[in-house]
Amino acid sequence: MEIIIPLVAVGFVVFGLVKKVGVFDAFLTGAKEGLHTAYTIAPTLVGLITAVTMLRESGAIEMLTEAITPLAQRLGFPAEIVPVALLRPVSGGGSTALLVDILERFGPDSFQGRIVSVMAGSTETTFYAIAVYYGAVGVKKTRHTLMSGLAADFTAVVFSVLTVRLFM
């Protein structure tokens, strides 16, 4: 299995040579464009990371979790998944830390563990994705992207619970 990535790299080089493309020049051009893209989106990422840190450190996530938990429990959602559902659209790393905590406390085969596992695979870090992809191409107005992404995340959370409840 360790040989797959080197084989793919060699395959690209061979394909480029067969097509008579200056492989090294194309690589340098791509690397230069990649650095420019990283430079372009860096301020957006710094702002996003700052916002996530402020949300976590200020206790806003906990306050929002406490406000939503009673409703979530009445709807059949375990209270433990609420912080993951709230943090997932904002921070992949933060939500993964919460997921690991739930897996350690309840176990991977628990109801909560299965829900957060399905949720992790079916939701997106919406704010991060918008920041990176739109920032890379210079889009300033996201139009309906944010609301659509958050609606998709909400749907994924609801169906994570329903799917685990139905099949497991």
Image: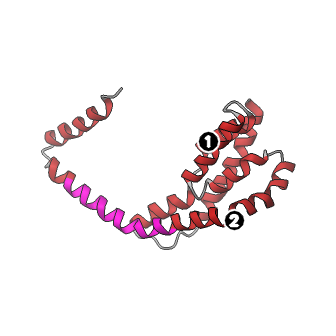
Type of amino acid under label 1: Val
Label 2 Cα crowd, 10 Å radius (few <14 / some 14-19 / many 20+): few
Q: At 70% from the left edge and 53% from the top edge, which residue is drawn?
A: 83
Comes first in the chain, label 1 or label 2: 2
Circle 1 sits in a helix, a strand or a loop, which is it? helix
Q: At 55% from the left edge and 61% from the top edge, which residue is drawn?
A: 127
Q: CA distance from mark 1 to mark 2?
A: 21 Å
Span shown in magenta: 28-47
Return the x and y of residue 98 as percentages of the image width and height: 64, 47
Direction top: furthest residue: 1
Q: Which residue is mark 1?
A: 100
Return the x and y of residue 109 as percentages of the image width and height: 69, 30
Return the x and y of residue 71 as percentages of the image width and height: 84, 55
Q: Are marks 1 and 2 in contact (CB under 8 Å)?
A: no
**Within the image, what quadrant is residue 19 found in?**
top left
Q: Is residue 45 magenta?
A: yes
Return the x and y of residue 92 as percentages of the image width and height: 55, 52
Q: Is residue 57 magenta?
A: no
Q: Which residue is mark 2?
A: 60
Type of amino acid under label 2: Ala
Q: At 45% from the left edge and 61% from the top edge, which residue is drawn?
A: 132
